[in-house]
Image (cartoon, grey):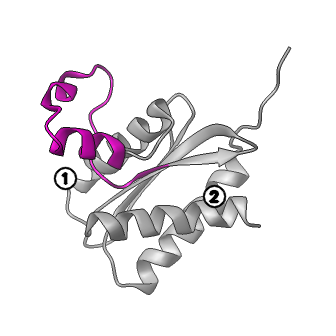
């Protein structure tokens, strides 16, 4: 039988603390969601001042990145490049940049989704959170 790593609560807290620190350091009001490899929400926080809609978008981005095993930007790019039929793909709604998978030993074990600022800044926050787990 194969085995693979998985996100523990301690791992999730490390990611959350680092992602929040990146957002706060830059004065960015965002929502941050962390999911497992099946897209099930493990963590959510909406920083003060974050738009209410970001509380729906961040988890959707995270779920999309986890289920697709790639950054959610891939889907945004497909759609923007004319493959609009991808909008009908089942089970994924957050086809916007800002969802980043958590990869450990070649396994996608979850994802982080961020919403509230420019998409590239959302990604910056997500990657900062993931780096706290994978670089440390």
Looking at the figure, which quarter contains the N terminus?
top right
Q: Residue at x 25, y 55 (%)?
A: 54
Q: Which residue reaches farthest top?
A: 1
Looking at the figure, which quarter contains the C terminus?
bottom right
Left or right position of 34 against 23? right
Q: Quadrant of residue 17?
A: bottom right
Residue 40 is at least partly visible in this image: no
Q: Secondary structure at mark 1?
A: loop
Magenta residue span: 73-100
Q: Residue at x 13, y 31 (%)?
A: 84
Residue 21 is at least partly visible in this image: yes
Left or right position of 104 against 112? right
On screen, residue 84 above or below 62? above
Q: Which residue is mark 1?
A: 53
Front residue of 124/84: it is 84
Q: Secondary structure at mark 2?
A: helix
Q: Which residue is mark 2?
A: 13
* Mark 2: few/some/many CA within 10 Å (<14, 14-19, 20+): some
């Amino acid at each position: 039988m194969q085995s693979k790593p998985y996100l523990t609560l301690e791992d999730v807290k490390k990611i959350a603390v680092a992602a929040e620190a990146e957002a706060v350091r830059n004065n960015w009001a965002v929502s941050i969601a962390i999911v497992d490899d099946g897209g099930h929400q493990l963590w959510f926080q909406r920083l003060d001042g974050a738009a209410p809609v970001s509380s729906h978008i961040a988890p959707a981005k995270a779920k999309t990145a986890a289920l697709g095993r790639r950054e959610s930007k891939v889907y945004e790019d497909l759609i923007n490049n004319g493959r609009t039929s991808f909008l009908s793909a089942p089970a994924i709604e957050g086809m916007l940049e800002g969802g980043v998978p958590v990869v450990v030993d070649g396994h996608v074990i979850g994802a982080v989704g961020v919403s509230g600022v420019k998409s590239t800044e959302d990604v910056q926050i997500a990657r900062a959170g993931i780096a706290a787990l994978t670089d440390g």
